[in-house]
Amino acid sequence: MDKLINYIKSNKTKSAIISILIIAFVVWLIWSNTTIEENSYVIYDEQIPTSFDGFKIAHVSDLHNAEFGQNNAQLLNILDNANPDIIVITGDTIDYFHTNTEVALNFIEKAMKIAPCYYITGNHEGWLGRIAFSNFEDKMIAFGVVVLHDESVFLEKEEEKIVLMGIDDPDYSYGFSKTLSKMATKEHFTILLSHRPEYFDEYVSCGYDLVLSGHAHGGQFRLPLIGGLLAPDQGWFPKYDSGMYIQENTTMIVSRGLGNSVVPIRINNRPELIIVELQSEE
């Protein structure tokens, strides 16, 4: 009888421990999928004009119609506190599989009140199709957003300039590589907005100074000491999944993004907002 009682107590203890661990894992999983991590990078380059020292760029990528707090209050609050000079949105703000574009539009309208916004397409905008996307784009433009379709604009401060370029995603527009090389310039410090990080070698060969990208979702599931597990168009153990990559004179910063699409959850991979600060010298 004593053995039976001890066995039952032992099993209850094990069950309680397992239940606690499961509950803790679920709570952590929910928290890590709904709480934004803000990461900052400083880019030093002698080609950056001194008037742009301290210039801040907030980098938003892969929102996929997600909401962080009611009406994206959490995301907007982080953006507001960062006090960026501009906000760049590098594609997949909407989601082909969950086309509730009002969530994305509501965020963009409010983001425009924080800083000027510049937008490029991702693969989900391409999958949606140009006709369907045009309605969404028209509304963004009405808010004052600058949508860059294989285009560049000058950003000016105190009569000094840097170049901001935006290229359409290959799923939105044909001729990606040819357009990429045609757009390149060495006359000014140049920032390229491009959804796809897997083209890093081409960005380097074209001579872009800074590239801001997304698409990889941080590899979706991140493994300690290894990194991302699987990313779109890079496959298993992607080379460019998160953070800063430097080759020759080109620096690429890859955002882990904010929302999810085909795979609905992340593991060890919090949604990310990036702040980039420019400095003319170290």
Image (tube, rainbow, N blue to C red):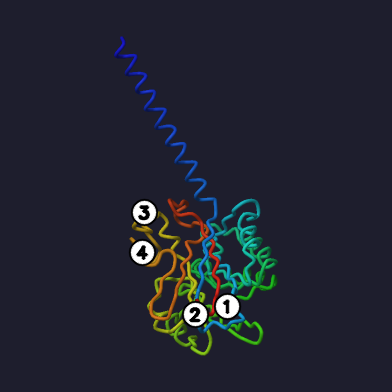
Badge 3, how many Cα within 10 Å: few under 14, some, many 20+?
Answer: some
Spot occupied by residue 91 in the image (x, y as percentages of width and height): 53, 68
Q: Which mark is residue 148?
A: 1
Mark 3 and mark 1 in contact? Answer it, CB < 8 Å.
Answer: no
Q: Amino acid at mark 3?
A: Leu
Tell me the residue that label 4 is attached to: 238
Q: Is residue 136 left or right of residue 33?
A: right
Q: Amino acid at mark 1?
A: Leu
Mark 4 and mark 2 in contact? Answer it, CB < 8 Å.
Answer: no
Q: Residue 162 is drawn in which quadrant? A: bottom right
Q: CA distance from mark 4 to mark 1?
A: 27 Å
Which sits earlier in the primary sequence, circle 1 or circle 2?
2
SS class of the residue under badge 1? loop
Residue at 56% in and 56% down: 66
Which sits earlier in the primary sequence, circle 4 or circle 2?
2
Which sits earlier in the primary sequence, circle 4 or circle 1?
1
